[in-house]
Amino acid sequence: MFMATPFYSLFNPNPQIEMRIRVQTIGVHSEFKKNKVTLLVMRSFLGLLGAARVCGINVFSIWGLGFKSPIFYKAFTLLFLAYATSAVANNWNSPYSAEQVESSTIFSSFSQSPKHLDPVVSYNSNEWAILSQVYEPPLQYHYLKRPYTLEPLTLEKMPDIRYLDKSHQEVNADSAQVAFTEYLFTLKKGTQFHLHPAFVKDSSGAFLYHNLTPEALDDIKYVVDFKEQSARELLAKDYVYALKRMALRQNHSPILDSMTQYIVGLKAFSDQVTEQYKVELEATDKRAQTHYFDLNQFDISGVQVVDNYRYKILIKGKYPQFLYWLTMNFFAPIPWEADAFYKQAVLVEKNLTLDTSPIGTGPYQLVENNPNKRMRLLANPNYRLELYPAEGLAEGADPALLLDAGKPLPFVKEVIYSLEKESVPLWNKFLQGYYDASGVSSDSFDQAVSVSTSGAMNLTSELDEKGIQFLNITQPTIMYFGFNMADPVIGGYSEKQRKLRQALSIAINFEEYISIFLNGRGEPAQGPIPPGIFGYIEGEAGINSTVYDWKEGRLHRKSLEEAKRLLAEAGYPNGIGEDGKSLTLHYDTAATGPDSQSMLNWYRKQFALLGVELVIRATDYNRFQDKVRKAKVQMFSWGWNADYPDPENFLFLLNGANATINTDGSGINSANYDNPEFNRLFQQMKTMENTPERLNIIQEMLTILQEDAPWAWGFYPKSLSLYHGWLHNVWPNPLANNTIKYRRVDVTDRIEKQAMWNQPVIWPFVVVALIVIGSIYPLMHAYRRRQTAVVIANKQEEM
Amino acid sequence: MFEYIIKRFLFAVPILIGVNLITFALFFMVNTPEDMARAQLGAKQTTPEMIQSWKVENGYDKPLFFNGDAAGFDKVTETLFSQESLKLFAFDFGQSDSGRQISADIQERMGPSLAIALPTFIIGLVTTIALALLIVLFRGSTLDTVTMMVAVAIMSVSGLFYIIAGQVLFSKVWHWVPISGYTPGWEGVKFLILPVLIGVFAGLGAGMRWYRSIFLEEMSKDYVRTAKAKGLSDIKVLFGHVLHNGMLPILTGVVVVIPTLFMGSLIMESFFGIPGLGSYTIDAINAQDFGIVKAMVFLGSVLYIIGLILTDISYTFFDPRVKLS
């Protein structure tokens, strides 16, 4: 999945740090109380002065300055009154109301407005951060267990799996006759959809809000504004309806074409309903947004509703990764009533659609969606009983993560995401305690993190004293430097061509890159599979021996001499080719901003170390993508985030069948790597369970890749996140998005800290006011003198 | 005057058609419908079928200006330009490429933009004129020299610096107001204080110098000497005569701005989290959302034309010699 804007997924606090913070907090609290008393006394005094003046009693006078109007005095009186009354109000600089601060609310931010909140369309992390709290696909990742483990979410149990042959007779999982896999899903009973106007019926049983007029929507901004709200139980047909919506091409689901390869009958169904819908749209002259198409009248041959609580999906062949897809919102249930309700033109005109106002069964309901300002989630009052996990604590995790074991979820009643486009206000509001968590941008890195001589990252003392917690995790992501294997110079599979890429892989020193451009926030990649995914091996056994050596228990990049030797063997001694000319290579990039220049210069420098000239071809992102799709690049940089924790999701990036030149540009293998042996092993590996045999095959594949070097491997980025001590149960899970329900907030601690960190400083205002007032008299005096001086001078002249 | 206004609005039609032509040509020189589809559908898992389906759904499968496959007049009407432009003249902005109703978005965002732009404009204008008059009152004095030096200094510093410094000083260090955010109604005043203050301050330097030069020019005119000869004080001369006569050149630059206040301010709104129109166009350009780009360029042009007409009309109020015909 492509990452847009991270909504910070966080992990455990160090218990020792937490203890130290608790001790510090006690000291700070007593000081805070002392300050609070002083402020109250001061405010009361000023308030009394103001109140006295309002009652007509002049406690003190400034008439001495010669003003005829008491306007300045009145202004001060008002100021004093306002200040005095603020003793009982919220902090002056608080962006929230006192009620919000005092409630169990998580305050978070987003920098990029979500474009789509329709679960069959949405495929961005910033959208899923919200959607995953609202919708519930059948499965989820266990919050605490590592490695990542699937568990039922709305299901009674994990799906029952049967393997079938061509005649639909059951066979063993290991049988070569397996032609289909059947998944049977059994839902928990009693799960309710959110309260919603789409379900409301009148006394005659007809839907009350399915035929709305513009007048009926005068006071309606969000769906929660409808007077009548109702819910209904989640049924198996709602999951099937979601699949049918995905198949409708007019809905533009990004995974439709992938899923048609696996789900039996989905392609035929998609073609049928898409054409039928098109005909209906043309006949009614309507757009897809405003014309409800009854998908219930059609069936997908491989998907079947068994009864109210059970449904089946038939998959072609074996595809164990299908279960991972079932944790994604594409497979979340959609009630047909909501689809019909949102197709009303009057609602569409108000931007009330399934794409803006989701309706799910999750722990939270989206009650406000203003993508330009704020997204607000409220706890679902009808949420079924789901408990905080009582087991599965990973090795090294904080035992405090089990303090809430067995308690009903969710803990937090409200989540407010505010739009923060700029990093400066975001960072400062986090430091003031107005955001519960924050990332660490390059601008604030030095303020947040201190790097020791050994390279270890720690919080700075300023943040440590505030009780802020620090998280540093390696993302299941690879950022790679790719070689176009279809290019006649840099590509190819001959020994010389391989050695050229190997030499360059050594020269592009990603340890240095990470240090210079990422403040150390990355881990040099040894292959396409990042840490945390099956197939990644730590330590000496997992190193890329083409580029690295293992010495004294750590990685050592091979020397430049080794790279030069390889380059000479490739036919370019000191970077000079057989034609006597220096080797010139081209690097395509969409990084055109001024900040990118230093990075591009660094690449030039690394190539120059081998005597190779690097020509940068910078262009805009559209053109860059187009060139990659058409294989008109030599070298480029790109990245990939895990969709699911399976090595297939990374190794398929180098599978020959996915090469862009083999797929008319739609393949994901941008390096156009196509090694028959690798492809064979990939086909063998991709449907296997995570067994030692599978690991052996993966190792074999990685060895082939390291030798062929279609990528210079790049790095696995690390994510640095911070959160305040009052936020509890924070544990990183980059693959799960529905984690807000586990979080807990210590509201009392937050209120105290916010008040302590945000006491208004009054003296600058008084000083400025005094300067302004003080300057008025000299000005008036100067003006009078100026007027008088002219008159006297004239008189003297006349005399 | 009514006839004049009608005439000016009619003149605006070819201008707006020209603006649309340029917008269409420039946008599609940089972006292809395929790029736009990819921007909306995401780069992953996107197949040619999905792209074609999106183009048809959103009308981007048609030629831009000329449809060679169509017959007769349809060669011109069955084009993207024709179908999208005509609707704009009826102020039917349609929907964005991501599916949102543009009119609803504009209505929702206009309020916050005005909430910050209008006070900044009014307070800024009054403050700048008042300070300029004060300087003129003390012209030639040390105060005049020092104020002009300060004005040049204010002009020399980037507006971004004032924003960041203001946020750090007033919110982070002194804790007076929120750093950013927005709430409609009176509760939201605390969010507007800082951006308005910074907006006014950032405009002080240029405004003071400009208005000072206007008022100084007026001060050297005969009517001022006559007024002084009658024994009027400097204050009465300034406020009673110079201010009124100096308003004409001020109006030239000020009234034209008023309608465009609706369009908001990109940087201010971004830094202060104001959900206005300021970033709407830029975000749309970045997202390759042509629906929004064309609507906002059209709206901006209309508002600018209205501003120019208002400027002409305002002349008649301040200078009786001016007649619109």
Image (tube, rainbow, N blue to C red):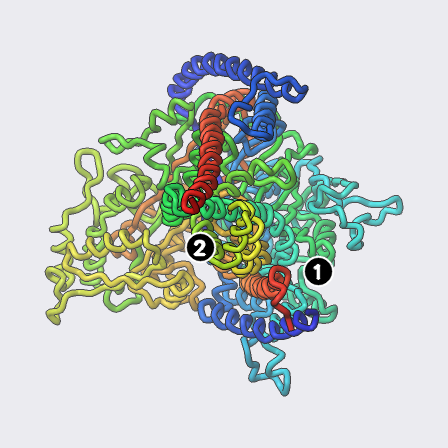
Other residues around mark 2 within 10 Å, as few (<14) / some (14–19) / many (≥20) = some
User: Which quarter of the rendered picture does the C terminus of chain A lie within?
Assistant: top left
Q: Amino acid at mark 2?
A: Ser
How many circles with numbers are drawn on the protein? 2
State whether residue A273 appears in this view: yes
Q: Is residue A752 above or below residue B322?
A: above
Label 1 lies in what chain? A
Which amino acid type corresponds to the residue marked 1 in the rendered image? Thr
Indicate whether A750 appears above or below A243: above
Whether B7 is drawn above or below A731: the answer is: below
Residue in the picture at 37% in, 37% down: A444
Name the chain under label 2: B
Q: Residue at x 26, y 30 (%)?
A: A452
Q: Which mark is residue A520?
A: none
Q: Is residue A148 above or below residue A40?
A: below
Q: Is residue A402 left or right of residue A506?
A: right
Q: Residue A428 sits in which quadrant?
A: top left
Q: Position of residue B68 (x, y in %)?
A: 56, 84
Q: Left or right of A130: which side holds A361?
A: right
Disc sitting over residue B213 in the figure: 2
Identify the residue at the far right of this view.
Answer: A204
- Point out which mark residue A290 bears: 1
Q: Nearer the viewer, mark 2 or mark 1?
A: 2
Q: Are marks 2 and 1 in contact (CB under 8 Å)?
A: no
Q: Position of residue A344 (x, y in %)?
A: 74, 56
- At mark 2, the secondary structure is helix
What residue is rendered at 39% in x and 37% in y? A440
Q: Residues within 10 Å of mark 1 (few under 14, many from 20)?
A: some
